[in-house]
Amino acid sequence: MPRPDPGLIDADTALFLDADGTLLAFADDPEGVALAPGLLDTLDAIHTALGGAMALVSGRAIGGLDQIFGRPRWAAAGQHGMERRDATGRVITVPVDPAELARLRETVHGVGAELPGVRVEDKSWSVALHCRERPDYEPELARRAPEIAARFPGFELQPGSYVFEFKPRGMDKGVAVASFLDEAPFHGRRPVYLGDDLTDEHAFIYVNARDGASVRIGARTPSQATFTLSSPADVHAWLDSVKARLTQGAASAT
Ligand SMILES: O=P(O)(O)OC[C@H]1O[C@H](O[C@H]2O[C@H](CO)[C@@H](O)[C@H](O)[C@H]2O)[C@H](O)[C@@H](O)[C@@H]1O
């Protein structure tokens, strides 16, 4: 898989960025992630150069993204698209059966309590079991998670990097990207999506079908992505080059 040229992003791009494993280096504790120095300045400049056509697309809740990035005016999709904030700040959510969600939560917390070192991340529409600190539990969770999902028909399993998430059925990052592309300022632009995980494959497939470009971070295979970058640090360096090209273009046009 080739590296993307920074020229992949031009003034007519709609840019979609996954958070963990793409913009953010992994940490044991989901609340322990940190922004790399300079990243926010780079993203701010790109956001401006693209006329706001840049969105975070994450498994995290939008509130969690805002705590990390501190940019409540950026468009964002959270919880794999269950909540979506458009470029005007309007938040759209998908309805979920609260009784089923409550039963799912209870079940997942029960599993977390049984397995020391396995973290439960309880988001408003989804619940996740994390085993980064106890990878020895991964085979057990890989066996039990589909059994749990089968008991909750309104939900489906979304595996990820040392995580087994239960999210409402029918929503994924590809659907979220499609919704953004129906709206200003994304509409009519060529989509480019950067992500690292299985959950990002939904978006890769969608942007590829729209003649866009997909960039896989890391070496996970198989992947539908058309380009690759090696790590979040590589993404930061690449985005710096993107920023330089975009802002030079703006300066020479004035
Ligand atoms: O779609 P993303 O932005 O990539 O979010 C996917 C999940 O990311 C977080 O979990 C992952 O990152 C944690 C912090 O580095 C790490 O501890 C964990 O092992 C990873 O799976 C987040 O906690 C989840 O809610 C997201 O769904």
Image (cartoon, helix red, strand yellow):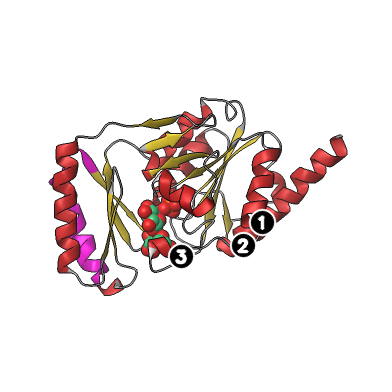
Q: Which residue is mark 3?
A: 26
Horizontal placement of 158 versus 234: left or right? left
Structural crowding at the residue carrying mark 1, measured as other residues with C-alpha within 10 Å and reported as few (<14), some (14–19) or many (≥20): some
In the displayed structure, 192 sits above or below 179; it is: below
From the Cβ of disc 3, is ligand 1 less than 8 Å away?
Answer: yes
Q: Residue at x 14, y 67 (%)?
A: 114
Q: Which residue is mark 1?
A: 238
Instruction: Indicate which disc residue 179 carries.
Output: none
Q: Amino acid at mark 2?
A: Asp
Task: Tell me where the magenta segment starts and ends, as one range.
Answer: 137-155
For marks 2 and 1, give the CA distance: 6 Å
Q: Can residue 147 be seen in this snapshot?
A: no
The quarter of the rendering in which ligand 1 is drawn is: bottom left
For marks 3 and 2, give the CA distance: 14 Å
Quarter of image, res 52: top right
Q: Amino acid at mark 3?
A: Phe
Q: Residue at x 19, y 53 (%)?
A: 146
Label 3 or label 1, whichever comes before in sequence order: 3
Q: Amino acid at mark 1?
A: Trp
Q: Which residue is mark 2?
A: 234
